[in-house]
Image (spheres, rainbow, N blue to C red):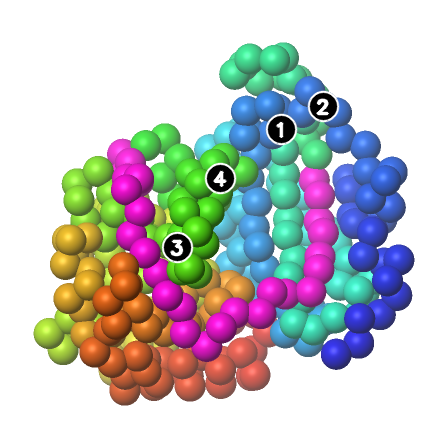
Amino acid sequence: MNLGDQNAHNKLWLNGNIVNEEEAGVSPFDHGLLTGDGVFETLISFDGVKPFAFTRHFERLIKSAQAFGLKVPSFELLRDACESVLGLYNVAPARIRITITAGRAPLGSEKGSASENVIVASSEAPEHPLYSKVITVPFARNERGALVGLKTTSYGENVVALALAYSEGAREAIFGNVSGNLCEGSGSNIFIVSGGELITPSLSSGYLPGVTRALVLEICERIGISVSQIDFPLSELTNADSAFLTSTLRQVQPIDIINGVPLNEVESNVYLKIKNEFLRLVQNEIDP
């Protein structure tokens, strides 16, 4: 892996220009900083040149931004911005983050009239272990909350939950919702096999619909694997036969231990079929 010009790692795209990190001026009164009035997307580039599944991420960014009344640059401009920052790094695989904040505003919750700040930054993608140990956390997702299904910069719950998971030697925190059903990870969606049935939470559970989750569901439909999108009690999670996480950076990652309980099977036949098809998709399509 070529790390490229180390000075490039201090550069990013801000409001249409490539700037050094030290020159990236964002007001301390930015509403995204003050209140979490912002949205973002995390993408991956497997070749270090182009972002994977850009259209799907862009469409989700639009949906999240509309809920906040935020303007999003054009598809072409943001895609070019992603490719520009990737060109600074010459790293593969690379993580790309698009962030849009509401700009300068009063100190309270009310919005201001300033233009949005749009930031595109990149770095080397983190390495994840082959398997993931997870814990369930005592914090519930509110499936009826105002931010359900949106990818926002209001990530405090995830920060706290993931820190708890790390403190217990786990790699991901799994949330239930206020109804007591399985919901999602701090930065991932979850699939389980229970009683021979592949299950993932229903949309009504309150999870953020992941891009990789959607691709996995399409793969399952294409190769004839039935998936039940239903409510599943969080309390029954450790009784699952097997389970795996999906996310942009994890891709499709099996779970080996939940709350200290080893699962019966880590790499199930269902998981292996899905994983192989996902890898084939990544190799053959840049924007599926």
Alpha-carbon neighbours of circle 2 within 10 Å: few (<14), some, or many (≥20)?
A: few
Q: Residue at x 51, y 59 (%)?
A: 56
Q: Disc 1 marks which residue?
A: 33
Marks 3 and 4 in Cβ contact (< 8 Å): no
Q: Main secondary structure of the magenta part?
A: strand
Q: Which residues are magenta?
A: 118-144
Mark 2 or 1 closer to N-term? 2
Marks 2 and 1 in Cβ contact (< 8 Å): yes
Mark 1 or 3 closer to N-term? 1
Q: CA distance from mark 2 to mark 4?
A: 19 Å
Q: Element type at marker 1?
A: helix
Name the amino acid type tagged 1.
Answer: Leu
**49 over 270 or under it: above or below:** above
**Residue 168: mark:** 3
Name the amino acid type tagged 2.
Answer: Pro
Mark 2 or 4 closer to N-term? 2
Q: Is 217 left, or right, of 281 in this rendering?
A: left
Q: CA distance from mark 1 to mark 3?
A: 30 Å
Residue situated in front as seen by the camera: 123 or 197: 123
Q: Is 177 left, or right, of 128 in this rendering?
A: left
Viewer-nearest of discs 3 and 4? 3
Please provide percent x and percent y for residue 61.
Answer: 54, 46
Q: Disc 2 marks which residue?
A: 28
Viewer-nearest of discs 2 and 3? 3
